[in-house]
Amino acid sequence: MVDIQLNATINGRNVSRAAKPHLRLLDFLRDDLNLTGNKEGCGAGECGTCSVFVDGVLMKSCLMPVAKAQGAQVDTIESLAKSGEMSVLQKAFHKAGASQCGYCIPGMVMAATAALRANPFADREEIKERLGGNICRCTGYQKIFDAVELARDVQNGRVPATALLETDTADGDVIGKNVRRIDAPSKVSGRLKYAGDMIMPGMLHVQVLRSPHPHARIVSIDTTAALAMEGVESVITSADVPGQDGFGVFVHDQPIMARDKVRYVGEAIAAVAAEDALTAKRAVAAIKIVYEPLPPVFDPDEAMQPGAAIVHDYAPDNITKHIPIRVGDVEAGFAQSDLVIEESYSTQAIEHAYLEPEAGLAYVDHDDVVTVVSPSQNITHHRHMLARIIAKPISKVRFIMSPVGGGFGGKEDMIYQGMLALLAMKTMRPVRLVYTREESIISTAKRHPSRTTLRMGVMKDGRIRALAMRMVCDGGAYGLSTEGVMRKAAILAAGPYAIPNVRIDTYGIYTNNTPSGAFRSFGALQTQFATESQLDIIAERLGMDPFELRRINAMRDGATTHTKQKIGSVSLMRALEATEQASGWEAGAPTVRGPTRGDLNHDDVRPSVTLGTRFTDSANQEAAE
Amino acid sequence: MARKRGRGMAASWYGIARTATVDRSAAWAEIDDGGSAKIVTGVTEIGEGILTVLAQIAAHEIGVKPEHVVIGDNDTARAPEAAHAGASRQTYMIGNVVALASREAKKRLVDVMAEMWSAPAESIRTGNGEIWAENTNHRITMGEAVACAKNRGVVPIGSATFGTNTTGIADGKGGDGAGRPWQAYVFGCQVAEVEVDTVTGEVQVLAVWAAHDVGRAVNPQGVEGQIEGGVVQAIGQALMEDYEMKNGHTTTPGFAKYILPTSLDVPRVNSIIIEDPDPIGPLGVKGIGEPCMVPTIPAVMNAIYDAIGVRVFDLPATPEKILMAIREKERRDAAVAIQAAE
């Protein structure tokens, strides 16, 4: 296809240039004009971080073919803070602490700008509705709403512009003060460069071939046709790994590309470095692989049974890790109990959904140091593993952590950095890989799905005598952080309660599902969901207030934990009391008393939502002002 | 009425920094020309606000303003190891070590000024970019003090390392799990208020009150940001998010199928910060990143039960699941009523 000649006004400047017709407006802005402030988060119009103004209308630039911008006036996040002076809204984001990882923020600022243009007097509920097309994974949105309200009030003269300034710390101590985030100006203005925004001269683009099978032997890989393509510099497979291949946070069971067999759909098998991403994609399609499908196993309970398919030869029972905790004699504890309750719980796999998909660059520097720049949450460990994989001394491996557009544990795994390093070594040129959203979702770790059986025995007065828990988690195809997750899950499973008899077993199991790994709250979320649900079931049976039941069993200062550790100060009682007071909790047993509660509709409760009912007519509002 | 409200609560605990292993971190500090502070340590933002926290800590320890603190990049070839960004360990492991390194750098500068002014080192104070000797007229800017030090051949630098007194747990075959997995523990509690639409099965979380011990809040707004974000992530898992697989293939490969909380799904989060200082580290700080997520899901499930008498054991509590559970409860209640009538 021939290039199109695009004439448009972009951030107030006339632009006239040739553009590839397959580009989206987002690609043209980011790749051709290097306006990387607006990000790509999903490529499907769902997250909103690519939002720009086209002829003054908020548009998702990932959905717009570049040709549609012919003759248009396009304004990106860069247009808002010309010459470094932030807009009122950007200053309000800074002041309110509305940015965390910052990756959604350029789009969020654009959407908020549009909201206040549409209705300069929008109330909080209307602001929420107008930001409904933009996803933020870090902030919980609350400080974003605060920021938009602050900007609205400053713009309308209801509060002075000084409200946007730093909290006064002239009295000396800065600890305990709401010092504005030092990274916020770069985030609200789109100036911060994440790995996917970085370019290096002579840089090649990487694409990855991924497994379509959950479990299959790789019979052969033929890269001849791919390598022969014009613009392709290198194609790598596991055969190119010079050292001892294997990474993982606890067990090094994962090769940087599948070796001999694939264990899950989406596993990397080969990678291509080419002059541009499109050529690399075409080369990936030209790689020929012959697979011999193997029987897969998808259910962790089935995987533990004899005769199940074996995912890793070193673990013929498919158990990645079992963690036991034993205190006292649980059977005796249940025998003594007045009431014994047993229930089963399950939790699902969860995607981290950080707005920044994985991305990274690698190059070999003037001292032959293999350097990887990526949003890695653990560069220290990654360099140890990579050094072994590429057979270099640690001093010849360097990791630089680029700004992380959300992690939540999902960027602790060295899932793609090995391929980048190898391609940089092969080509002696800088290489860059940027995942699509789909690639990120199918190939990276999830929160462990769990199945838990929990038995608890209590006395009539509420004292817990015994707790027995068994949790089986689907760890997926590789170990990643499974061992650590099982350990933390077990240690914290019984909750912050003094219980004389405890038996806990957590199991992480290999299957041919997407691997599970580190995720904020690391196993403790799964086990304490069960324990805290069960405590309410018990409170109802005993006719006891749920706070009271927890108080009766709470660890106190100097308690001994279920791992037999003596700890010092225990702040649990303070936390219980603070929550009870702040919420105005009305004491009583949890006997479905919602309909008769007297503590609902507290001042700190938001109104409930009925979609689409809160847009107001800005003209009327203004008149009412 | 189709919409019913209820409340539920849950408590929680969590360990700070790496689990059942020795954790460690290191930092370098320099009081630079012009009186700014330069901190180099293996840390980068993952969004939690650690750079700002470290700037506040260095500013507090050295006596400069937070905006005059420069933090070097996280780079294995250029910065000392501070290990990973996770495990709710950043403020605890890196905050504490930056405090220690800053103290050493400051001590170098103070020793020079004490000698110059013939004043006891204990009488030298710093703050707001100035350094002075108590009960004297000696008072100069930090920038001037750095120049004095350099004229005497001293560059005011410091370095520190911070490690935990922790152990593995006995989790081998036949083990009982005994050990010291952490040296700092935190506790929390949350109340959730929900509204359940019994016609559509939809659950709205209208409010969460969240009280969490953080040891000492360096930046309260940042702590609130962590709590608000953690609560909303947990609500995602409680009510809507589900990475589904069929025969090894995901059926939720994008945000059209994998549903995340958006601005209309979030409750008002009311954070209550509890400060029970850690007695071991130099600052008393602990952590908040992960602990704030733990009690939310059971608090929401307990609240749903309070509202409609239906308990969800299998996450997420989607509208479909809530409706099915309501139908089942109605059948059960009807059967009980018939039995009672007979």
Image (cartoon, helix red, strand yellow):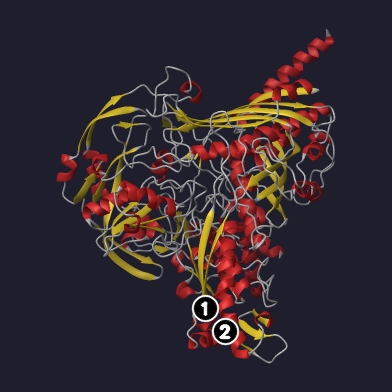
Q: Is residue B306 left or right of residue B327?
A: right
What quarter of the picture does the N terminus of chain B occupy? top right
Q: Which residue is outermost to the bottom?
A: B137
Residue B60 image position (x, y, % from top left): 63, 71
Residue A181 visible within the image: no
Q: Between A432 and B331, which is closer to the camera in this rendering?
A: A432
Q: Between A24 and A147, which is closer to the camera in this rendering?
A: A147
Residue type pointed to by label 2: Val
**Which label was assigned to residue B156?**
1
**Distance from label 2 to label 1 (Cα)?**
9 Å
Q: Are marks 2 and 1 in contact (CB under 8 Å)?
A: yes
Disc 2 chain ID: B
Residue B109 visible within the image: yes
Quadrant in the picture for residue B54: bottom right
Tell me the SS state at disc 2.
helix
Quadrant in the picture for residue A167: bottom right
Q: Between A322 and A358, which is closer to the camera in this rendering?
A: A322
Q: Between A435 and B160, which is closer to the camera in this rendering?
A: B160
For image coordinates 68% across by 33% down, the residue present is A531
Q: Is residue B136 left or right of residue A259?
A: right
Residue A35 image position (x, y, % from top left): 38, 63
**Residue pointed to by mark 2:** B112
**Which label was assigned to residue A109?**
none
Q: Mark 2 or 1 closer to N-term?
A: 2
Depicted B49 relative to depicted B313: above or below: below
Q: Which residue is outermost to the top?
A: B342
Q: Is residue A456 left or right of residue A19?
A: right
Disc 1 chain ID: B
Residue B214 image position (x, y, % from top left): 67, 55
Residue type pointed to by label 1: Pro
For image coordinates 65% across by 79% down, the residue present is B127
Tell me the SS state at disc 1.
loop
